[in-house]
Image (cartoon, rainbow, N blue to C red):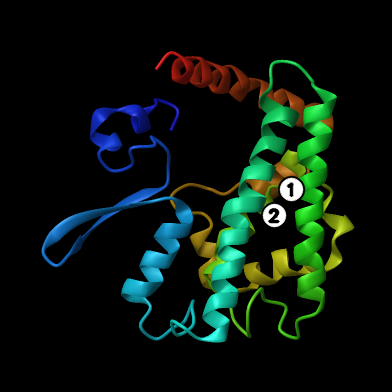
Amino acid sequence: MTENEQKEEWFLKINPNGRIPALTDTLDGKQIRVFESGAILQYLVDRYDKDHKLSFPHGSAEHWEMTSWLMWQMGGLGPMQGQANHFKRYAPEKIEYGINRYTNETRRLYRTLDTHLGQTSSGYVVGDKVTIADVSIWGWVASAKWAGVDISEFPHLEKWLYKLLERPGFEAGRHVPTHHGAFEISKLSEEELEEKAHGSRSWVQAGMKADAKK
């Protein structure tokens, strides 16, 4: 949110961490807040996915496998690839240790999922359908090149990435609320990527300085 709306008082009442995503809903006649993407996905399927189109019955083996991969994304892939993005694209100076540390850890995590997908018969993360595990991971993998990772190194993961786009609902949903441009970005040269990152670098650094003063 380029105008830092997420730092305003009204938003902090929804997510005290001042980050997106976050949502509000009504439960038992009262407004509730849910923040962090994993919690939001779990809430949505627990509350609204009664037919288990994107989930599995609570307590089933598949449910816990799905939850494990969701937490894998929240606790591993997201933080590590986020840091790879930062050191590769947004840091004010190139620190090779930071770039190598987080890019290679992202590659290790990709390899973990690539191996898992190669052992499944469906090509999905859990069971024979798309679940919130796939949804939580997909956006990160779609942005692999931004983090300095070559997706072609992971054939099962690359196949999964495009397999999900064959679903009309998934293809439409990735463009909400705005156009999802990760694949266009992945076609850019390294020089073009650096130029694109330059436009956001000052904004990221300004946000870090503002947070440090609080």
Q: Is residue 134 visible?
A: no
At mark 2, the secondary structure is: helix
Name which residue type carries label 1: Ala
Do the CB atoms of the residues marked 2 and 1 lie less than 8 Å apart? Answer: yes
Residue 46 screen position, x and y as percent: 36, 73
Name which residue type carries label 2: Val
Q: From the viewer's perspective, is 12 left or right of 106?
A: left
- Write the residue at 83% across / 28% down: 97
Can you say which quadrant of the picture contains the C terminus? top left
Viewer-nearest residue: 152 or 82: 82
Residue 22 screen position, x and y as percent: 36, 48
Q: Is residue 88 visible?
A: yes
Q: From the viewer's perspective, is 189 left or right of 26?
A: right
Residue bearing mark 1: 144
- Write the residue at 59% across / 68% down: 68
At mark 1, the secondary structure is: helix
- Write the residue at 80% across / 66% down: 114
Viewer-nearest residue: 67 or 193: 67
Residue 141 has which mark?
2
Q: From the viewer's perspective, is 186 left or right of 211?
A: right
- Write the residue at 71% across / 84% down: 122
Q: Is residue 212 above or below residue 158?
A: above
Label 2: few (<14), some or many (≥20) within 10 Å? many
